[in-house]
Amino acid sequence: MERDEEAANNTVPDIRLQQQRSSIPSFLFIIFMLFMLTNHNGDEFLARNHYQDALQSLNNQLSNFTAWMNGTESNFTLPARHPATSSLVRSFMTFDPRLGSSQSYFSNITGFVRGDVDFHNITPPSLASEHTPWTHYAQSLMSDTNMTELTDKTGSWNWTASDKISWSVLVRAPTDLKNIAMVHGRIDLADARTSQEMRLDFEGVQFLANGSIYGFVEPSGHHIDIRYLPAIVPDALQNATAHAIEPELVSRINKVKAMIDAGIIDQETAEEDSASPGCGFELYAQIEPSMISEELMQELEEELQRPTGKHTVEFPKLSLNGVLLSKECGILYRLHNTEGLRSQTFFRKVTTYAGLSALFYLALLILLSRQMERCRTPAGISRVSLWTFLTQAIVDAVSFAGHITFAILANGRPSLSLVAPAFLACVLFAYESQFAILINQIQAPEDAVAPPIIPPPQSAPVVLESTPAATIPQAAPVQPSPPPTRPTNPSFFSLLLQHLQSDPQARIWMGMFFFLTFIVRVIVSPSLALLFVASMYSLFWLPQIVRSARRRRSSALSVEYLVGTSICRLYFALYFLSCPKNVLDVEQRRWVYYLTFFVMLQVLVVFLQQHLGPTFFLPDSFTTAPIHDYHPPLPLSTSDPEAPDHSLGDCAICMESIYADDQKLRQPVTGGLLHKVSARRNYSLAPCHHLFHTECLEKWLAIKVGYRKHVRRQLTNNTPAEHLSAMSPAAPATVAFPITS
């Protein structure tokens, strides 16, 4: 209202004032423009055009391939196969494709295959010093290699450092073909030293009768033309492979048409044109035959696909070996020591993990609620560490994001089971964050800085009418005051900064927000994830030990909460870092056992602090109990925001307002340090974090001490029959018990 009246009385036009008031609408307009600039409408438009081009390309491939199969004129030709390729590949195979009477092959290997790879350099300079049975085959294959092009294709990836392979496989059998199936998937080559991975796409064909797999492997984003698959399979299987490719091309065309009609745009698929150069491979693999008959294998596959509860044989071990061959880069990888995990088995494992994780998170939630109930008073809250609960809240936030990401990647029935631990982790994070905020509010006066005391302005001398003009001191000439500045609307950022400075809860939530933006990076990077686990798990109870030793007071944490929380937290670290067959296939880390020992050692120290003293492990010079400061500098956030006179709150004894600045106490003080002390003498903060008037607290303590002395004296002099009457004496005399800062 005052601003409107000032604007109405001012002779300056209102245009400038209207421009100043439009800061919030301008901010909203900027947000809207940023949203329009950062949305994915342009990406979807480009992706839709890309889909149109892909559909046209698939139609051309299908027409040319169909014409080639029919023997008519076509632009498609099948490249010739090098005769040394088959001999080189067979040199690394260890499984015999021939079956016995009680053996059979897996007809569906959809799932995950993990194993080891051995790198072999088959470039001509390297083969010159190599003397192995397969060397002459490799020399014949690489005889016409252009070394300049080979160096350009290898790129910056260190192909020699890869020793692990992870292969996700999806098998889809055509409806009109029985002994052949199309295989899709993705292969990841891992660098053990840098924890980096090379992601490759795979397209191939599986022959169910002999358990052999043939396909092409290209870096992600490169187009794989499945029409060339007949060129790498044996001659007897070329015709069957060509007949399996045609329905696969038709299926892909129908899929792209359906996605365009439905408006479903997969932007990852639309990024193929931006793929970086890399090495392409040919894959030759052989499945190890299982030790069960073909009838039992068919019965097992039927039960896995459509469960009925029928008893079947135990699922046999899935293993294979193979070769990744790249003539254009001179690289050969030998696949061995592989172990397959069927998708159904993986789904059961994920569901089991989700159920156990939900139980552990439920136990953590119960333990936290019981602990919060025990230390609900200010005295109990002052004995716990803020960083202990804040660290656990951060860990639960990362766990929530990780389980949600895992559920999205699972993309099936297991994703529903992962929602339970994710939800409980989110609830646990909310409770721990709220409790950490409460701890910060209670413990804020401990580290507060005394606010500056501003002396009152000097008042001008008052001139009375009866005073002679000669005795009136002549004041200095009054300078004309500058015109009042026009009030301006504060900007959004200034208001946000002011709010963060005055509200401790806003600071904590803002800090948590900026930290949570780092969570995605932690989840994606394996090295950062391991560093995060090691650092956060080491800080669970260490801040509590330090606080108890500094305050010379034992913690308010119960043994139930200490032991139970530690066991539940360590379950996740031990499962992922010590279990060789965890759901995420994380490699074992030996240091997780040292981490477990360090966490349990912290629990033991906290337990001993409650029985042997908070400083039992420190020298005697650190065991002196500190003197409690009843007049600490209180921050502005301690004052009551609803009080019109900006008081610190109400006294817990007389229920009247408490003021940090009392003019009565300032009168005998001239200034300096005593001036600041007197400004804080009006209030007293007890060890239980209750605020009193200093005078009220002195009287109450005097009455309490005098009453105890009176009762003790009566109990000592009177007979047991008179003890009851001594418990209700008249009000004793006040005993002086001064409290000074």
Image (cartoon, rainbow, N blue to C red):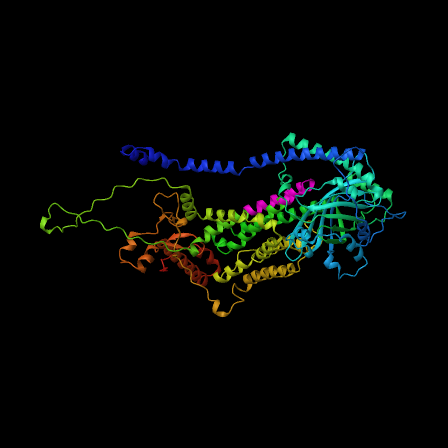
Quarter of the image for residue 597 reads bottom right
Name the residue located 34 percent from the left edge and 35 percent from the top edge.
Answer: 17
Where does the image place residue 485, in percent across and percent down from the top left?
29, 41
Name the residue located 44 percent from the left edge and 53 percent from the top edge.
Answer: 444
Magenta region includes residue 413: yes
Magenta region includes residue 280: no
- Residue 515 visible? The answer is yes
In this view, 312 is above or below 557: above
User: Magenta stretch: dominant SS?
Assistant: helix
In this view, 13 is above or below 429: above
Q: Which of 344 and 18 is in front in this view?
A: 18
Position of the N terminus, as image quadrant, is top left
- Residue 310 visible? The answer is no
Position of the C terminus, as image quadrant, is bottom left
Residue projecting furthest to the top: 261
Name the residue located 18 percent from the left edge and 47 percent from the top edge.
Answer: 478
Task: Give the residues drawn in magenta, as a range.
Answer: 405-430
Where does the image place residue 277, in percent across and percent down from the top left?
65, 47
In this view, 15 is above or below 560: above
Residue projecting furthest to the right: 101
Where does the image place residue 244, in percent across and percent down from the top left?
79, 37
Residue projecting furthest to the bottom: 620
Q: Nearer the viewer, residue 154 or 510?
A: 154
Q: Which of 503 and 374 is in front in this view?
A: 503
Where does the image place residue 680, in percent across and percent down from the top left?
35, 55
Q: Is residue 588 left or right of residue 69?
A: left
Q: In this view, does 385 lie to the left or right of 211?
A: left
